[in-house]
Image (cartoon, rainbow, N blue to C red):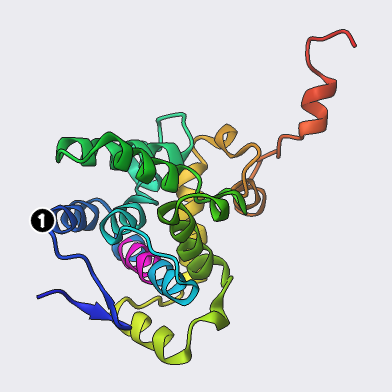
Amino acid sequence: MSIHIADIAIPDSRLAAEATELVREATDDLLYHHSRRVYLWGALHGRRLGVAADPELLYIAAMFHDIGLTEPHRASGRRFEIDGADEARAFLVAHGIADEDARLVWQAIALHTTPEIPTHMDPVIALTTAGVELDVLGIGYHDVSAEERAAVVAAHPRPDFKRRILRAFTDGIAPKPATTFGNIKADVLDRFSPGYVRPNFVGIVEDSDWPE
């Protein structure tokens, strides 16, 4: 029997259960509860708009979306979003999921820190970003009822979340600062990583090897 939170069913398939177990073991309480909330917020957003996403794929995208911040990925030299997207796709392919569906989840995770563009894409992609934006940035906070917010947070608490998630972002990306170029995560290092110098697009254009 599936669990319902704020009248949203948590997928109870074997695939979802194994994803939950993998992410639970790979992350701490902060990222685990955040990832579950992202799924719930995304599903609630979709229900409000009448937008249907495959719940299992949305769940996998939400659960894996921040796994690229964890210790094993900090020396990859790649954007944490790409590390998480690759891990989710490998998990899905290993479980016999169609390439098209695995690619959808990959895109949902890879684009979840890119404002606006995901809104115009497949519901799995759009709702993953919507869930992240609500939980981290508070975008759409008042589109969810107080009762729904209370139910989600009761199931997946967020104590001191703002400070702790910014710390997790910093820890996950500070070892590879160049990966934040052109990304909102540059703001995190600008605030919290001593010695970080934000790359400037105009400067890169002006300083390129082209003579004019």
Asked whether, in this view, residue 182 is left or right of residue 41, the answer is: right
Q: Residues within 10 Å of mark 1 (few under 14, many from 20)?
A: few
Q: Which residues are magenta?
A: 32-40
Task: Answer above or below: position of 45 versus 35.
Answer: below
The quadrant of the picture occupied by the N terminus is bottom left
Q: Is residue 156 magenta?
A: no
What x and y, as percent, mark residue 25? 19, 54
Q: Looking at the image, can residue 4 be seen?
A: yes
Q: In which quarter of the view is residue 50 placed?
A: bottom left
Residue, x 40% and y 30% (percent of image)? 76
Residue closer to the observer: 180 or 112: 112
As shown in the figure, which amino acid type bears the numbered disc 1? Arg
Q: Is residue 35 magenta?
A: yes
Residue tagged 1: 14
Task: Answer above or below: position of 183 versus 33.
Answer: above
Task: Answer above or below: position of 128 versus 50.
Answer: above
What x and y, as percent, mark residue 198? 71, 39
Residue closer to the observer: 175 or 140: 140
Residue closer to the observer: 184 or 176: 184
Q: Looking at the image, can residue 72 be seen?
A: no
Residue closer to the observer: 168 or 108: 108
